Image: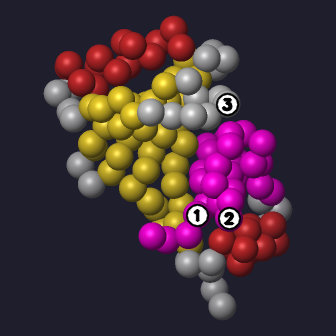
Amino acid sequence: METKFEGGINIAIKIPKNKYEQTVSFYRDILKLEVEEKPISNPTVSRTHEVKFGGNIVWLDCVDNYTHSETWLELNVPDVPAAISHLKDHQIETCDEFEEIPENTHWITDPAGTVFIVKNRD
């Protein structure tokens, strides 16, 4: 069975603490997008805001120990273990130590360092 990857609706921008309020203000006050702070209990993300971005959701995540922002993307698959096996066959390893995530999901990176969450299609 061939693994089929699809882009998901969630995009996370990991933002250093010293730039977080300015970034939230940019999306809310300058772009006038719908922005709502959401509760979060995560050891690496101290605050998060959900931004409605057309058919996507951009998560503005405050990461206290970052020095620059990063964009993280979502990949949806029909079978996570099969997808991870396919990726490992192509020398792409998981890096689940990046951030706590639900069971049966995994973090990977592309060769340029872009982070992806691999998860089951909803």
Q: Residue furthest left?
A: 32
State yes or no: discs 2 and 1 in contact (Cβ < 8 Å): yes
Magenta segment: does it hold 98?
yes
Q: Position of residue 15 (x, y in %)?
A: 52, 23
Q: Is residue 29 above or below residue 57?
A: above
What residue is drawn where x is 24% and y is 24%? 28
Query: Dot 3, how many residues are within 10 Å of its Cα: few (below 14), some (14-19), or many (20+)?
Result: few
The residue singled out by tag 1 in the image is 119
Give the Cα distance between marks 2 and 3. 19 Å
Q: Quadrant of the C terminus?
A: bottom left
The residue singled out by tag 2 in the image is 104
Q: Residue furthest top?
A: 18
Amino acid type at image mark 2: Asn
Give the Cα distance between marks 1 and 3. 20 Å
What residue is drawn where x is 56% and y is 69%? 120
In the picture, the disc for residue 43 is 3
In the picture, the disc for residue 90 is none
Q: Position of residue 26 (x, y in %)?
A: 29, 19
Q: Nearer the viewer, mark 1 or mark 3?
A: 3
State yes or no: discs 2 and 3 in contact (Cβ < 8 Å): no
Amino acid type at image mark 3: Pro
